[in-house]
Structure formats: structure tokens, C-alpha cells
Image (tube, rainbow, N blue to C red):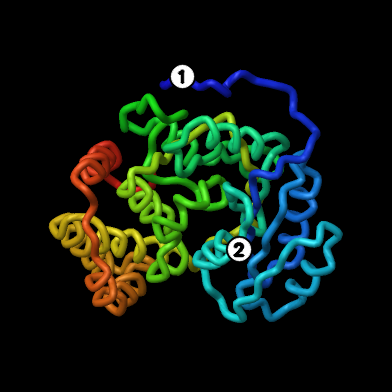
Amino acid sequence: MSADPVRTAEPVREAPDDRVTVAVITRNRCAGVLRTLDALTALPERPPVIVVDNGSDDATCEAVRRHPSAPRVLTPRRNTGAVGRNLAVRQAATPYVAFSDDDSWWTPGALRRAADLLDAYPRLGLVAARTLVGPEGAEDPLNAVLAASPLPDEPDLPGRPVLGFLGCACVVRRDAFLGAGGYHPLLFFGGEETLLAYDLAAADWGVTYEPTLTAHHHPAPGGRDGRQHLFRRNEVLTLWLRRPLTVALRATAGLTAAALAGEPGSRRALGELAVRLPAALARRRPLPPAVERAARLLDRDRPQGGPA
């Protein structure tokens, strides 16, 4: 792993840090987003917070406005999905933006260290954190996947190079994120991170996993029930948008076979893929050769899919 000029562990400093804004998206999760705001308010960095309310029809928006931390609230008046993060990044006045969902937050000192890394490594566009799940602080399975990424070390980047991350546990360079287009509107929500990682890498920004940064994620029990078709749909859409046609066709054939076999969610995923496919083809932009080689290396290392 490459040398890290800011790796040395230091006590958490209590002074505020004005380099990172935290962007939060929420929808009809009043109690959860208030808990997230409480946790973010308690951080020593005291980051500015922007909350995007994705069309809540309960008391979420008003409760957020009344929170003592006085976050900035954006109200697109509809559910924008992951694209709500783009809205927050555009409004941020800091060079770096961290993401939290309404069930996640950062540990003390993590945002300061992320900013130090982004300061020290000018090509670093996104740094993904280690994620601890639930009150017991269990390791998210994705941590091990990212840590085992087969992509080679890069001397001008910290951590482990990856082409995937968890959306609620990463910090981005604002200019890199916006230059890459942010989260793609065609995916809306569910597994949208891989496409952003591809687009950052295609623009020669580094995407890395750095386990010395930590975020907490407290999803509600069964929180992803009913969403698995979105992840399957978007996995294949991402291939149509950026990968060779042979790769996309093979994945589509696999999804079709799963739908014919009656696998849960696969028929719905296939139907929604068919609706979005013309738009995907119109926006298709194959990866540069170096990024495609990296993606193929991950394909070989991870034949069943999943981010890394």
C-alpha cells in the first residue's frame, strides 16, 4: 500500500473543521434523520449539513427544519432518489462533501481525516470508509470486499484502489463529483455507486477504500425489503451504460434466465430494465481502456458481481 503522510494516529481534535459538508437524503424517516442529525451535531468537526427531503409526506421536513443544528433543507418536492445527493453537492460551499443517509453518521475525527487525505492527495476524488452496522458495530460485509480489491496500489493515492463503495459512507472532492456528473438519474436508487466510481475513474480521479475512516450505519430491520429488484436492474443498466456490449448482453441473458426461473424480483427487474434500455443506449459512454481493464480484473475476481 502506498505511503500515507497523514496515516499517523492522532487524538481527535475538538476544533471545528470547515472543509467538509455532510449531505443527507431522507424520505418519510423522521425519527431516523433526527438521530442522524443529533450524531452529526455532536461531531468535533461541527460540519455544515444539507438535508434533501425527497418528497416526504409526513412530518420529516418540518422536524428537520426545527432541529437545533439548523441544517440547510432542500425540498425538490418529489422523490429524486440518489440524485438528491447531487442537489446537495451543488449547494455545498466546502471543497469536500461527505454523505450520510437518514440511518447513518460519521465517527468523531473521521471527516477531519478524510479532508486531510483529500488535501494530501490531489488526484483523490472519492474515499470510502469502513462501515460498522447496528448498535453492536458489526463489520459490514462490504468492508472485506473492498479491502481485498485486486486493483494494484497507486503511488499517488492512499488506501486500496476500488471501483465501488457504500453511498452513505464516503467523502468526495466536490469538483470531481460534479465533473463526473454525480449520481446518474437513470438509476434513481439502488446500487448506483458503481457507475459513479466508473465515471470518476474515467476522468482520472482516484477512488479508494481507507479503513481508518469509519461510519456507522443503523438500518431498520428489513429496510431493503422490496428493493432487491432495483439492485439487479441497476447492475445490468450500469453495464449497458459503460461496459462492452458482450458484457451487457451476457448479464441481460442471465437476468432473463432468472426471470424465467421465477427468481424473486427478477421479472420486475427485467421489465424495468426493458423500459430504461433505450435511454441507456442513448447515454452509453464506454469506459476508457485502462478503466475497462480494471473492471474486468474485478469481474474475474468477483464472478457473482458486487462492488469492489
Q: Is residue 14 visible?
A: yes
Image coordinates for residue 259, horizontal then vertical, percent: 28, 69
145 shown above or below 56 = above
* Circle 1 residue: 3
Look at label 1 and name its amino acid: Ala
User: Which residue in the structure is indicated by mark 2?
Assistant: 91
Three-letter code for the amino acid on which mark 2 is drawn: Gln
Residue drawn at x 38%, y 66% as measured from the top left: 264
- For residue 25, what is the image quadrant? bottom right
Query: Marks 1 and 2: which is nearer the front?
Result: 2
User: In this view of the protein, which residue sits in the foreground, 57 or 241?
Assistant: 241
Residue under the image location 40 percent in, 39 percent down: 206
> Is residue 308 in sight in this rendering?
no
Task: Name the quadrant containing residue 245.
Answer: bottom left
Q: Residue at x 58, y 50 (%)?
A: 97
Whichever of labels 1 and 2 marks the residue nearer the N terminus, that label is 1
Residue 130: where, in percent of width, then height?
55, 37
Give the residue at x 46% y 58%: 178
Q: Is residue 166 above or below residue 258?
A: above
Q: Position of residue 272 (x, y in %)?
A: 34, 75
